[in-house]
Every structure is written in C-alpha cells, then in structure tokens.
Amino acid sequence: MRNGLNGILMLFLLTSMANCKEITPAPCGPTPTENQLRWQDMEMYAFIHYSLNTYTDQEWGYGNEDPKLFNPSHLDCRQWARVCKQAGMKGIIFTAKHHCGFCMWPSAYTDYSVKNSPWKNGKGDVVRELAEACREEGLKFAVYLSPWDRNHPDYGRPEYITYFRNQLRELLTQYGDIFEVWFDGANGGNGWYGGANETRRINGKTYYGWAETFRMIRELQPNAVIWNDGGDRGDLRWVGTEAGNVGETNWSLMPGTGDTPWHMLHYGVEEGDVWCPGETNTSIRPGWFYHDAENDHVKSLSKLMDTYYKSVGRNSTLLLNFPIAPNGRIHPVDSLRGIAFNKMIQEVFKTDLAHKARIRSKGNETIIDFKKPTSFNRFVAEEEIRYGQRVKEFRLEALVDGQWMPLKDELAENGDGLTTIGHRRIICFPTVTATKLRFTVTDSKCDPIIKRTSVYLAPDLTADIPDSGEKKSSGLHFYFSSPTQLLIDWDTEQTITAFRYLPPQDSRNGTVTHYTLWASTDWSNWEKISSGEFSNIINNPIWQTITFPPTKARVLRLDADRLATGNRMAFSDIEAVKE
Ligand code: FUL
C-alpha cells in the first residue's frame, strides 16, 4: 500500500511550512508510545502453540502430564520461522509455558520442562532454537508465559509469584530482544498443583502483583509491549473474542483503571484516558493446539481474508496462530494456507488506483478523480495516530453516471460501518465503476490528520477457487495461491523426476496450454525446472508428463503461463513422480 500523501495531511503540511512554524501538531487526547507505534506497524505476527498438549490431544493440560511425552521426531524451528515469514508474519509469539506449567526451555526453577524429556536427551531448548531461527529469518520474537500454572505446588500462594518472576527473568535475559510479553488471563480453577488435585481460584487483579512485574519488564526489555488480560492495564488489550474480529468502531483508547466489560474490549472507548490498542488473536484452525481431527478444518482463504479485513483493516493487529504438529513441524495444510493468505493480501493491495488519480482536498473532504470510469471495491484510510486517534465518522461516495452514490462497509455489523479510522481502516464494498470517489470526515474529536488514502480493485479470487485439496492416494497437498498458480507441498524434502497434469475433461475452461514449473526446498529460493507447452492438449486432453533430471523439492509450483480459455487454471488430476 505505497502511495502518495493524502490531501488533508498535505494541506496541513503546506500551511505549516508557509507559516514557517514547527509542524508538530498538538496531540488530541492520549497518544501512543514509540513501542506501541512500532508494534502497530507490524500489523501481522504469528502465535505458535506447542506443549505437552500436542501429545495428549488437549487444549488445556492439567499439570500432571508426563514430560516423557515430549519427544518430537522432526522438531524444526527453522521451518516454523520460514513458514511464518512466507505467510507475511513479522514476528512470532511462542507459548514458552502454557497453563499446564511445562516449560519449553530448561528453566532453572522447575523440573517440569524439556530437560526431563527424551528430546535431545534433555539437552534441548525450544525457546532458544526458535529465538535463533527468528533472528535468521529477520522475524521478531516474543513469549507467552501463562500466569496460571496447573503444575506448580505453590500456585495460589505468594511463593508462586517469585517463581513466576524468576521464570520471566530467564526469558527476558537469555534469548535476545523480545517484542511482546503475553500474559493470558485464563484461570479455570482446578489443577494438579504438585499432587494436591484441587481448585485454586485467585484474584487476577491483586494476586500477581502486576505493577512490580511490569517494572521488571520495562527494565529488562524496554522495547517490549505488554499484553495483559486481567489486572493492570498493559500496553495492548484483548478484543474480547478469539474468533478473529474487532468492532468496526475501534478506538485505541481505554479507561486507565476500572473494569473492562466486553464492549470496551471490542470497540475501545472514545473518551478513554490511556492509549491501549486492540490485538486480534485467532488460530488458523479451530483449536490453539494441534489435533489430527482438525486437519480438514483449517480456515479457508476467504475466512482468513475476512479476518484480515476485520483486524488489520479495523485499526488492530492480527496475531494468527499456527499450531505445531506432534512431529515438531507446522502441518503442510496450515503452511500452504498461511502462505496463500499472504499472497492474496499482496494481490489485493498490488495497485493503488488513487496513485494516478488527481486528489483534491478541501476542509474535511477529499475527492479522488480517476478522470475516467474506474472499477474498485476497497478503500483504505490511515490516520497519523502519533498525534492521537481523531476521526469519529466519515462518508464515502462514488460518482456513477453523474450521481453521488453512498458506499457502505459490507462487513459492518452496525449501520454503514463508517466509524473510526486509526492506524488503518479498510472498507470493502461490491465493485463499483465510477469516475470519482469522495471521502468526507463528518465528525472528529480534533482536526483530522489523514496520512494516506488509497483505492483498490480486489480480484474475486475466492469465489470459485477450491481452498485446498489433498489427493489422499498420493499424499499430495496442493493449493491454488492465485488463479494461475498451483502449489504442491510435501513438507519434507523429496526427489522428483516428473510432474503430470490431466486437464479438465468436461470443458476447455482452465486448461493450461503453457506452463513454467518451479521447485523449492525452502519456500524462498525457486529453481526453474522446466517451461514449455502442452502440445495438442485442447484437441486431445490426455495426461501430460513433464520429465526432468532428479530435482530436490519440498514444494513444486506450476505457473499457468497461458490458458485455453477462462482465467483460472483447472485440472482433473495431478501427479508428481518421485525417484
Ligand atoms: C486463551 C488460552 O486459555 C488458550 O489456551 C490460548 O492460549 C489462547 C491464546 O488464550 O485464553
């Protein structure tokens, strides 16, 4: 989304320069810290849930699960980091300790950790391997440390707080820079608690002594943001649901103290007195941990796009969870889906139609003049939030056949949905063909400072692309990452000698006539294996075989360079021949 400065801001800068004044505007209410600004710019980052639960098919461990269960055959943190990077994630937050209390690093303060597992003979450290993998991939790293600990005998007593802080200190001092610290608010009460097997409820507001813990974080990791769901207000807030959406009205403001009922989490508070933006957390699967039974329920591309619009597109960030499978890797269905998701985002926001348009601003109104009928279905506005969140309401209109037509947010749950902007607001509406687009701020807390506006035509990619498929017979996981690109992922490295394609048998539509075939072992470096034509495929739609010298591949990519008719590739069957 690179594009010119919007008129409203431009006007503001020009006026300021003409007056030779400092161009720093007065803040409007609470403003973000540098940490919060840096965090908001990350937009998308990954959660990784991995613990003993992965081996017991549970979502919440009880605290008495045997550490010997932790023995992955192919644990590969580099694969996690590579997948997350390709999926557009800017960092990873890892469940260093989930509610069961099992530590994924060899903490000096408990035996309930990887050091008593058979994995690497107890010499392994998943937190370290992941922190290093993130650094190698240029991703930021962060930790989830569950305050609720169902294993620890002292949980519920003051001694546990010392234990908790000791563990936090280990995580904050031994693994390099941490961008976020995640304290889950869950406390289901019962647990093993060192064999007591009882219910222990605590007061989340007072028990953990958050003020002291926060002081420690500020001292040890001054650039980290704190997510806290219970007790003292951190730097970020939960959005009140794990379904993957925040309210279309979303203020990055909250009351500094007091209770936070659901609507405050979901919509923020216009008159809030602290800056506390929402982070939208959701999993790519129904559960947070891996379960075999969910392999057919990985979220579809259209669901993920919906999640993107309802999080990043609503002044929030998206924290998207990838569970780790028992073998120690992200499952290929999840990795393909994540990567396709990122490709789709790139595709949607590839060409800013406002870039070549004439943009004029007057007061609170901006007119984008395309000079000729232009089709579009996405509008994006961004406020300069450094000086506060200002816009309360706005209007969008398209000039169609000389008439101004109001546009509304088709994903809105309330009214026309044209409320609040913040860091980034994306409005989705059915494709309209118009010569001009008018954006008017109709109500704001102070003079609006709009940093950018942009306009896009999202291709209707999701309508009839199958979300994924798996040929159970040959174990092929395939995915359409665009209408003309097919990906096949084996997860582990294979040696391939041929690729076979059977075109659609009932119509020519989508038949590939010219192709390029690529192979990759790491998702980033692609080797061209072959390119050419499928001769006579239209008149005789039989199996087509591309043979080549043995080639190592984890992923194969078939680009349809030309189709017989239509604009989406299709097939009746595909096959890859292994050595
Ligand atoms: C919840 C936890 O109880 C889940 O297990 C998961 O970790 C999720 C991110 O937060 O509150």
Image (cartoon, rainbow, N blue to C red):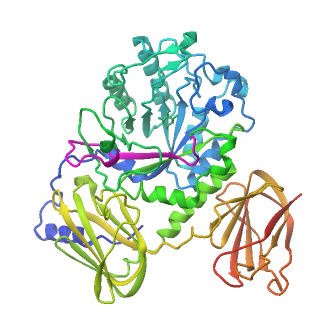
Q: Residue at x 69, y 81 (%)?
A: 562
Q: Nearer the viewer, residue 11 or 500?
A: 500
Q: Nearer the viewer, residue 29 or 414?
A: 414
Q: Can residue 329 be seen at all in this image of the molecule?
A: no
State the extent of the magenta-drawn residues as a range.
266-287
| Residue 271 is one of the magenta-drawn residues | yes
Relative side of 129 to 451, left or right:
right
Above or below for 518 versus 204:
below
Relative side of 537 to 284, left or right:
right
- Hey, which quadrant is residue 239 in on the image? top left
| Residue 337 is one of the magenta-drawn residues | no
The residue furthest right is: 579
Q: Residue at x 42, y 56 (%)?
A: 310
Q: Nearer the viewer, residue 19 or 179?
A: 179
Q: Nearer the viewer, residue 350 or 147?
A: 147
* Residue 344 percent coordinates (x, y): 54, 65
* Residue 33 percent coordinates (x, y): 28, 44
Above or below for 227 versus 338:
above
Q: Can residue 412 be seen at all in this image of the molecule?
A: yes
- Hey, which quadrant is residue 470 in on the image? bottom right
Relative side of 288 to 477, left or right:
left
* Residue 316 percent coordinates (x, y): 38, 51
